[in-house]
Image (cartoon, coloured by chain):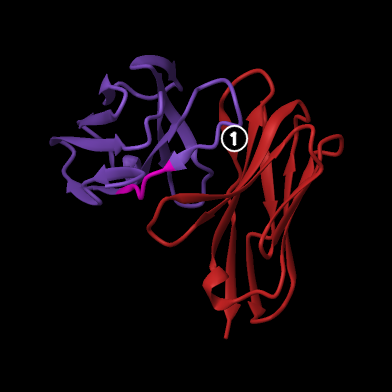
Chain colours: A red, B purple
Amino acid sequence: KQEVTQIPAALSVPEGENLVLNCSFTDSAIYNLQWFRQDPGKGLTSLLLIQSSQREQTSGRLNASLDKSSGRSTLYIAASQPGDSATYLCAVRGGSNYKLTFGKGTLLTVNP
Amino acid sequence: ETGVTQTPRHLVMGMTNKKSLKCEQHLGHNAMYWYKQSAKKPLELMFVYSLEERVENNSVPSRFSPECPNSSHLFLHLHTLQPEDSALYLCASSQDRVSGPDTQYFGPGTRLTVL
C-alpha cells in the first residue's frame, strides 16, 4: 500500500526566503506525482505535475524535482511571498491505477 | 460558472437528517471523484465515476450514497451520519480516469459538521 509522507508538517519563514518542502513515498512504481496548494477552507489547486519519466518541472518561482528510485520529491519555492502562505500537498498516482495517494501536507506561513 | 463548483459550501446536520451534497463540473471531463478530508489526515478517496459508471467504492460506509446522473453532475447523499463524519468533502474531475497526464481539478469543498 502506497504511503506518502511530507516533512515538515509546518514551516514559518520570513518573506524573501528560498525554501524546500519534502515529500517521500514508499512505492516507487508511480505514474506521476503532483504538488497541490490548498488555501484555508478551499479546494486544491494543482501547481506542478511530474511524470514518472521526468526529473523536474518548473513554473515561475516553483520548481519540483522527482527521484523515483529513492521515492522522493521536493518543491522549491524561490523568493517566498506572504501570498504563498497555504498548505502544500503532495500526491502520487499509482503505476497500475488512477488513484491519487496524498500526504498530510505542509502548512507554510510566509511572514511579511 | 467555470471549473468545479460545489454546493452547499457549509452544512450542519443532525445524525438523523438526510442531506445531499452537489458537485458540478464545467470542464467537459469524463471522470468525477469524491474525497474526504478530515483534520490531521490525508485526503481519502471515496468514490470514482467514469462516464457515469461507478468504478470505485473505497470501503465507504453505506450511509454515504453517491449518484452520477450525467458526466457533469455528481451527488453525495448523506443519511444517519456520525459525528466522526464531520470533514471537508471535496469533489474533483479529470479528463479521463486512466489515460493522459490526468490532472484532477478540485472544487472548493463542502464543510460538513454532524452534531
- Identify the residue at image location x=57%, y=86%: A112
Look at the numbered disc 1 and give the secondary structure of its residue: strand
Task: Place residue B75 in its image quadrant.
Answer: top left
| Residue A91 painted magenta | no
| Closer to the camera in the image, A47 or B110 | A47
Residue position for label 1: A101
Q: Is residue B29 above or below residue A21?
A: above
Magenta segment boundaries in residue numbering: B106-110
Q: Quadrant of residue A79?
A: bottom right
* Most distant residue in the bottom direction: A112
Kind of residue indicated by mark 1: Thr
Comparing B57 with B61, the one in front is B57
Q: Position of residue A99 (x, y in %)?
A: 56, 27
Residue positioned 74% across, 72% down in the render = A18
Image check: B92 left or right of A92? Answer: left
Main SS of the magenta part reads: loop
In the rendered image, residue A50, in percent from the top left (x then y), is placed at 70, 41
* Magenta residue check for B107: yes
Residue that lies at the very extreme toward the left in this rendered image: B17
Residue B14, horizontal then vertical, whole percent: 16, 43
Q: Is residue A94 left or right of residue B72?
A: right
